[in-house]
Image: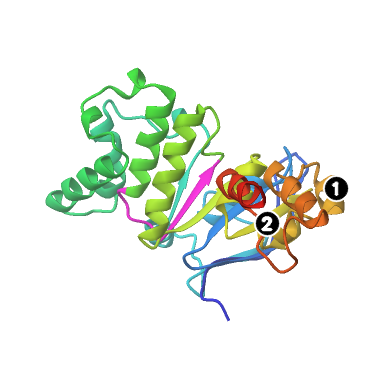
Amino acid sequence: MADVILEARGVAYRYPGGAQALRGIDLAVPRGIRLAVLGANGAGKSTLLLHLNGTLRPERGAIILDGQPVEYSRRGLLRWRRQVGLVFQDPDDQLFSATVYQDVSFGPLNLGLPEPEVRERVEEALQALEIAHLRDRPTHLLSFGQKKRAAIAGIVAMRPGVLILDEPAAGLDPDGAEQLLALLERLHRAGTTLIVATHDMDLAYGWADEVVVLHEGAVLRHGRPEVVLRDGAALICARLRMPWVLEIGVRLLEMGWIADGFRLPRKRSELLACLSNRG
C-alpha cells in the first residue's frame, strides 16, 4: 500500500447560508506525488484545498495527516501548517509585509525558530525562487509574476512536506508558467509532495502523477492522467475537455501510429518526437 501523507475521509462542508460545497470527499495523497485537482468553477477545488491545510473545518468527516487525525487547537494547527503549506491563487491575498524579505521571514518567525535559522531559511527560499535580488523590494511594487514567486517563497521557507497551490499558473505568461513548473520540479525532486488545483488540462496531463476530477463537491474520477483524462463521459459531466496532446495521441493510437501497450505522449515534446519517429 502506498505511503499516504495526507487524506480526506468523508469530508463534507457547507458555507454558511450557501450551497453544499463538498459532499463526502474521499481522497488519499501518497507521499512524494504530484497531484492535480481538476474541476469546473464551483466544483469544490479551492474549498478542498482550504480543508487540507486547516483553514476550513469540515462539518462531517476528517483530515488525516501522516496517519493521524489532525487537531484544530492552536498547537495542532501550528504543527499542521509546518507540514502542509498553501499558496493562494491571488498572491495579494498572501503578501502583507512591507518588503519581500519581511514577508518570506514571517512564517519561520511565527514557528518560533531562532533568528539564525530564520535567516538561513529565508535565504534558501529566495535563492530557490530566484528572487534574492528582490529581498528589499516593497511587495506592492512587484510584478504579478514576482508576487507569485514571493508568495511561494514564504511557504517554501517553512519547509513543508506538502505544498498546495491553487491555480499557480493563473495570470502568468507562457515563460512565467514554464519557470514555475521548473521550480515545482525542483521541489518535487527534493521530496516535496505537490498538490495543484488547476483549470489547465494540458498542464495537468503533462505534469501530474495522478489527477482527481471533482464535480459538484464530490470525486468523480481519480487515477493516472492518461486513464482518467481519456474518460470522455466523465469529462463531459465535469465540464472539462481532453488535453490536446492526449487527444492527438489517442488519434495516433487509433490510426496505428502508436502501438498498443506503448505509453501515450504526455508533453508537446514527446508528441513531436513521436511524429518525427513516424516520419
Disc 2 is placed on an element classified as strand
In the rendered image, residue 254, in percent from the top left (x then y), is placed at 82, 55
Q: Residues within 10 Å of mark 2 (few under 14, many from 20)?
A: many
Residue at the spot 63% in from the left edge and 47% down from the top edge: 271
Q: Residues within 10 Å of mark 1 (few under 14, many from 20)?
A: few
Disc 1 is placed on an element classified as helix
N-term mark: 2 or 1: 2
Instruction: Read off the residue under disc 1.
Output: 237
Furthest toward the front, the residue is 279
Q: From which residue to which does the magenta span run?
A: 157-166
Name the foreground residue: 266 vs 32.
Answer: 266
70 lies left or right of 119:
right
Instruction: Read off the residue under disc 2.
Output: 212
Q: Identify the image quadrant of residue 8.
A: bottom right
265 lies above or below 65: above
Residue at the spot 57% in from the left edge and 55% down from the top edge: 208
Residue 25 seen from this side: no
30 lies left or right of 161:
right
Going by the numbered disc 2, the residue's amino acid type is Val
In the rendered image, residue 70, in percent from the top left (x then y), is placed at 50, 66
Residue 51 seen from this side: yes
Furthest toward the top, the residue is 141
- Residue 158 in the magenta stretch? The answer is yes
In the rendered image, residue 132, in percent from the top left (x then y), is placed at 23, 34
Name the foreground residue: 18 vs 227.
Answer: 227
In the rendered image, residue 90, in percent from the top left (x then y), is placed at 51, 31
Q: Which mark is residue 47?
A: none
CA gap between label 2 and label 1 equals 14 Å
Q: Can you say which quadrant of the picture contains the N terminus?
A: bottom right
